[in-house]
Amino acid sequence: MEGEAYVRDTEQGERSLLPELDSEGAIDAVISIDHVTKRFGEFVAVDDANFHISRGEFFSMLGPSGCGKTTTLRMIAGFEQPSSGEIRLDGKDVSRVPPYKRHVNTVFQQYALFPHMNVWDNVAFGLRATKVSKPEIVRRVTELLAVVHLADFATRRPGQLSGGQQQRVALARALVNYPSALLLDEPLGALDLKLRQAMQLELKRIQREVGITFVFVTHDQEEALTMSDRIAVMNEGRVVQIGTPQEIYEEPTSEFVAGFIGMANLLAARCEGSDGEFRIARIGDQAVKVASNGLAIGDEVTLMVRPERAHLRTSAPPMDLAGVSAEVVDLVFQGPIVRFDLRSPDGTPLVAHVGPGSDLPLLRPGDQVWMCWEPSAGRLLPRSTQGFPRPDVLEY
Amino acid sequence: MIQRDDQGRKRARAAPWLLLGPGMLFLFLFFFFPLYTLLEMSLSASPSRFASPVFTWEWANYSEALTQYGEQFSRSFLYATLATLAALAIAYPLAYVIAFRGGRYKNVLLGMVIVPFFTNFLIRTLAWKTIVGDQGMVVDMLRTVGILGEHESLLRRPIAVIGGLTYNFLPFMVLPIYVSLEKIDTRLVDAARDLYSTTWRAFRKIVFPLSLPGVFAGSLLVFIPAAGDFVNAYYLGSTKTTMIGNVVQNQFLVQVDYPVAAALSFVFMAIVMVIVAVYSKLLGTEDIA
Amino acid sequence: MTDRQAMIRTEALRLARMAGTPRWSRRQFLGRSAALLGVAAVGPAILAACGSDESSGGSGKSVTVSNWVDYMAPKSPKAFTDGTGIELKYKEDINDNNEYFAKVKPNLSKGESIGTDAFVLTDWMANRMINQVKWVQQLDDAKFPNKANMRVTLQKPPFDPTRAYSAPWQSGLTGIAYNIKETGKEIRTLDEFLAIEGSTTVLAEMRDTVGIFMLATGADPSVPTHADSLPAFDKLQKAIDDGSIGGTNGNEYVNDLASGNLAAAFAWSGDVAQISRDNADVRFMIPESGGMLWSDNLMIPSTSEKPGLASEFINFFYDPVNAAVLTNYIQYIAPVDGVEDELIKMGGSAAKLVDDPLVVPTAELLANVKIFGGLDEEEEVQFDEHFANITGTG
């Protein structure tokens, strides 16, 4: 109820769950990261990041530790200043503006709740620093505590709360200020798996309720996929791909993204020719059809197939399917699926998730099979210079 | 079966007491027993000057302690309070800089705070005497600018004694404050700044309250020994700056009046306990996690 | 003195210099407050521990002596053992009369041994030991033939009229030391001392300070009564109240005088003898109304089982030859006749000491000093309390 009032108050207006895919041209950008680079001495933490975050969007920055996502977030919050480039909040350059003058708020890793204050005082902290009237403070704190379901805990100290409750206090403490954007730095990292999943849903609910832009930093690809409207995947200081979870998952543009988001079978291939809307790729001595994506004929490429898109056959696939021969290495029953670990003739490890619908004979390690997929399920990626990421290593 | 259960329960009940045992024994031997001896002494009287005092419920010792030495008592607590405040004013910024700006030199800087403690207390006091002595730079400067007259000194004045107390006990203030500041998660400061607080407000609302346990511990560690100190008053002060420690020392060594010395010690202890109780009530540090 | 002892002593001297003390003497070593602190007592404890290293065993005859720090010539203990065949355990464990009294009180009051056969304490404490608490025994005159060499002026102190219980180890004078640079003129009387504009102190030892004030107010400190001393106390009180006297001083006045922290102070002759040699501005004088003469006296605790050996010890140092060695090193006033001749025989810097009135006082000087007389218990309490009151601890 309070939450609804909140949405009305802030007059967020209409918003689309899936904002403009083209981030460059996004209208109504709350945050613009304009060719921002951050160096610490010789080390380049963020390398020419350039993107926009739209109003009301749930935007995630995803990547392994040290990829620059937290530094980017800290620059948005104002704790770090860009070495070059510009950060704009609501259209204004804030690159040199201290944190306390920026209308964004942060939910910190481990929450950073003030241990000597009770929940109420924690939540009211930001409002008391600004010129908000007392009755307004009471109204807003009450409202936010209701939004995070902590109305009965106002007089508790953070030390007396569970991890999930502390998490919600941290959220309320930031949101009570009605910021232009809420920055979340791995906010769920400290929670155990079950609580984390519950909090993911809770966060989504709250974001829907308050309608504020969330900028969410995580190294957990599943979390990012579950919650985000858009994801920026970062690696070694660079933004390697930005898109909706679906785009990122289904149409990765690099081996890194393919391997980092979900599991991927990556096969060394060579782009040989075209067949209508498909490209022909050669893997070893086999030619397979793959959806075209503009790579030039003759390029050394990598072919990606998601394990759940692959199925197994004991005989060579028909013409309309793509496939490679492989040997069963191991198989693991995982409930909804059976996971097959395979090896191609050139030794590349492969994985196939086989659902209950398939009518396979009983397979054992050492059996020869074919791993097949619809040509549209395969993606051609430029060959990385760093060699293949192994799926079992990259699996998160 | 039932019996064994009972034994188990008995053992379980005895366990905490057994665990407490060594600590209790220590406390008894080295705290309660001496305290009792002191109490007994404070209520004794000597039949003649050098005879061993005999326990006689001699309350007169307390009336003497309470009535005759008011001046030295109040001076002790006044000097100790001023020394504590001075130490706090110096130690807090020092500890703050070491904790938050010390970087990799933290340990070196802390070492420098502690190094003077490697020398004898007395030597430090005498070193302080050199600093505020008539031939020292400080007096020279004060005389040049006319704050002190040509024949005026800092020595043998209250300020020399208070300065000596501050100087001698400063590390006791720096270290606890440093520890409590060091413990503060700097993300709390980030959080406060994120929540529209200037650095100053973040300090007032977050850093300072969280460092109060250190301030509390440091103040007590400075105040209590400073109030009971007699070396600084003896070497740096005059007959007009004597503290209660000097009185106890005189009663004990020169006048050989152990009962009055004991009564004075008890009164001193009682006053300190009241002050500490009031102080901890005011600071309310038990609330801070 | 063993090498190790010498090393520790050198180190201790270095520390003392760091603290601003140019040289220790028996009285100016860390004062009573330091001793009470315990920490400072570490120095003498180490020295004492090393002292016992000298025990070489053999004859089976051994004697233990407690004395003040730096009150012995380095070669004398060995000379004593070589000359008498008695092994000597020499402990430098006395820093302060009151502190030493508090230390031995628990044992001696119960008649238990304190692990020493002789100790050296100042006149008034000797009085307490001999006449009040009676924790000492007579010297064995048969083993102390050199007693005949004792200076006449020291033979009949009021507290021990026949010197049956005590023998002076060294003597000294209490007078006024001043830095002529600070005072600008010579000081001759107590009133001139009180009129000095710069900082001044009196001694924290009641008898030294009150004695000089008694002499200045016409009272005789050699037969002191509290009633007679009232004018002296009043004069002292007034001087402290109006700021003529800055405070009391234990033993650091030497450095303060030399450095100019003090313009003048009540002082002990031995200390000044040492610094005035380095700093000609520091002078010592006995006020025209008179100064005090004091001695530190060797006594044998009643619990010692070796009064004979202890008597042989003091007898050795009453031989003028041995006494001169001591005087040459520590530069206090020797209680032994004939020391002057021996010093002249030694020649060099030792011979020059004969001309130093602080080491070999002239008859004229000696005529103007008094020994503070014995006080009975009641009188002593009155004196101590009155003095404590005036000096802020009562």
Image (cartoon, coloured by chain):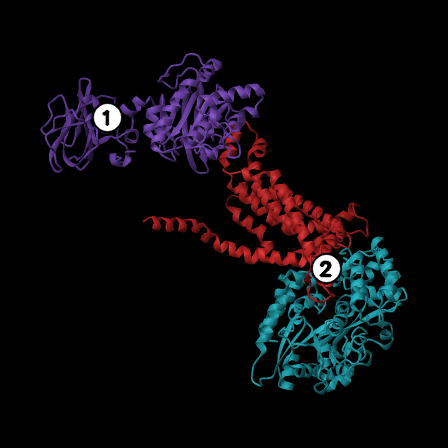
Q: Of the numbered discs in the image, which one, if any, rests on residue B251?
A: 2
Viewer-proximal residue, A187 or A117? A117
> How far apart are the two marked residues, 2 and 1, measured between alpha carbons?
97 Å
Q: Can you name the residue that lies furthest to the right here? A: C218
Residue A139 screen position, x and y as percent: 52, 19
The chain to which mark 1 is attached is: A
Horizontally, residue A217 falls left or right of residue A371, namely right
Name chain C's colour: cyan
Per the image, the residue denoted by label 1 is A380
Can residue A65 be seen? Answer: yes
Residue C53 screen position, x and y as percent: 57, 76
Chain represented in purple:
A
Residue A161 screen position, x and y as percent: 45, 32
Chain represented in red:
B
| Res C319 → quadrant | bottom right
| Crowdedness near tag 2: few (<14), some (14–19) or many (≥20) residues, C-alpha within 10 Å | many
